[in-house]
Amino acid sequence: MPGFNTVPGSSSGGGQPNMTFVGSVHMSTYNRSWNQGGTAGYYGVYSANQEAGYAYFVGATTTGVPLNRMTNVTHSFTRIDIIAPTNDMVSLYKVKVKDTNIFNNPFALFSSFVYSTQSSTSFVLPSAALPLVNILICGGGGGGGRHGGGGGGGGNVVKLTALTAVGTTAITIGSGGPYNGNNGINGSPSYFGSLYALGGGRGAQHGHTGDSGYGNGGGGGGHSGAGNGGTGTVQTATTGLGFAATPELFGGNNGARANGEDGGGGGGAGGSASASVSTSNRQGGPGHTSDISGSSLLYGVGGGGGRHGSSPGGHGGTGWPGNIGHGGHGGSGDNGGYNPNTNNAEGSGGGTGIVTVRYYIA
C-alpha cells in the first residue's frame, strides 16, 4: 500500500504510543460525513493511501485541516466532514502531547542567506536549508494623477516568519502603476506562491476620487472640486495574508482628500496620508521599514499630492521614494516642486514591488 509506513498505528498495535486509534471510514464517494464526536484536543486524520484531502471538525464552530497531519481542535465536535479520493480509507487518531516551552531565537543557531527579486521568477530552496523561511512581500505602488492629481498609494507589505517552504515556489512581482494621461494606474499585487501583497491604489486626476479596493488608497484630485481619498484594503487570511507562520500586514491605509488646488497624498504601508493641508505640502503616508534584506529599507511609501496652480505640489511620505513599492506623485501645474517631474503636469509612476526570502543553513 503506498505510504503504508507513514500511517501511524494504534498504541495497541505497536505504533506511536501517543496516538490512540479512534476509527476509520471508507470513502465510497469523495464527499463523506462521519458522525464521529469528540472533545477539544489534538487529532490526526490520515489517508491510508497518503492522498491529499481535507477534513472538517464540525461543532459550534468548524476547524478544517488537510489530511495526513495533526491539528489542535479547540472545540468539541459532533461530526467530521471529509473530502478525499474515492475508495481511500481515512483514519482518526486522538493525540496526547507533552508540555513544552518556547525556544527563543532558534534561527540564531544557523547561517542566514537572502534571496530578493523584483522580477517574476521561482525561488528554489537549497537542499541543505531548513524548510522554514522568513519572507517579505510588497506590492507595486499606484501611479499619481495629473495636474493637481492625488498621489498613488504604496503597495501593501506582508511578512511571514517561519513559513514552511520546500522545493520550488513561484514568484510574481507586482508592477508599479504608470501615469496614463489622467488618473494613474493601480499597482499590481506581488505573489510568493499563493500568498500575496496588494498593490497601491491610483491617485486621481483633478476633482476625482482616489481608487479604493487596493492595498493603500490613492489620493483625491484637487482643483475641480475636492476628490476624496481612496480606502485601503486590510488583508486577511482569505486575501493573501495566510493563516500560519505568524503573518503580519503593513498597509490597508487610506489616501487623503483633496483640498482646493491641492491633491491628496496616497496612503502608505506605514500609515494613512497626512490629514494636514497647506498650499505646498500634501504629504503621502509613511512606508514600512524592514531589515530582512540585511539593510534597513523603506517599503510602500505613499506618493504626494500635486497642485493645480503654480505653487509646488506635495511630497511623498518620509523617505520617498522609499526604494520599493512607492506610490507615484500627483502632477503639479507650472512648478513640480517636490514632484520628480519638475515643471510637468503629469503624475509619476509607482514603484515596482518585491519578494525577499531569508533562509537558513546549519
Image (cartoon, rainbow, N blue to C red):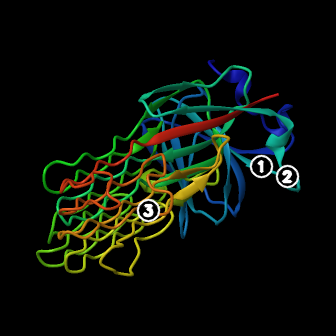
User: In front here: 100 or 203?
Assistant: 203
Q: In the picture shown, does residue 169 fall above or below 277?
A: above
Q: Residues within 10 Å of mark 3 (few under 14, many from 20)?
A: many
Q: Do tag 3 and tag 1 residues touch (Cβ < 8 Å)?
A: no
Disc 1: which residue? 95
Task: Residue 330: give x, y in percent of width and height.
Answer: 26, 60
Q: Do tag 3 and tag 2 residues touch (Cβ < 8 Å)?
A: no
Marks 1/2: CA distance?
26 Å
Secondary structure state at the residue bearing disc 2 = loop
Secondary structure state at the residue bearing disc 1 = strand
Q: Nearer the viewer, mark 3 or mark 2?
A: 3
Disc 3: which residue? 268
The quadrant in which the N terminus is found is top right
Q: Inspect the image, locate mark 1, and give the three-letter code of the amino acid beneath it.
A: Val
Disc 2: which residue? 104
Marks 3/2: CA distance?
32 Å
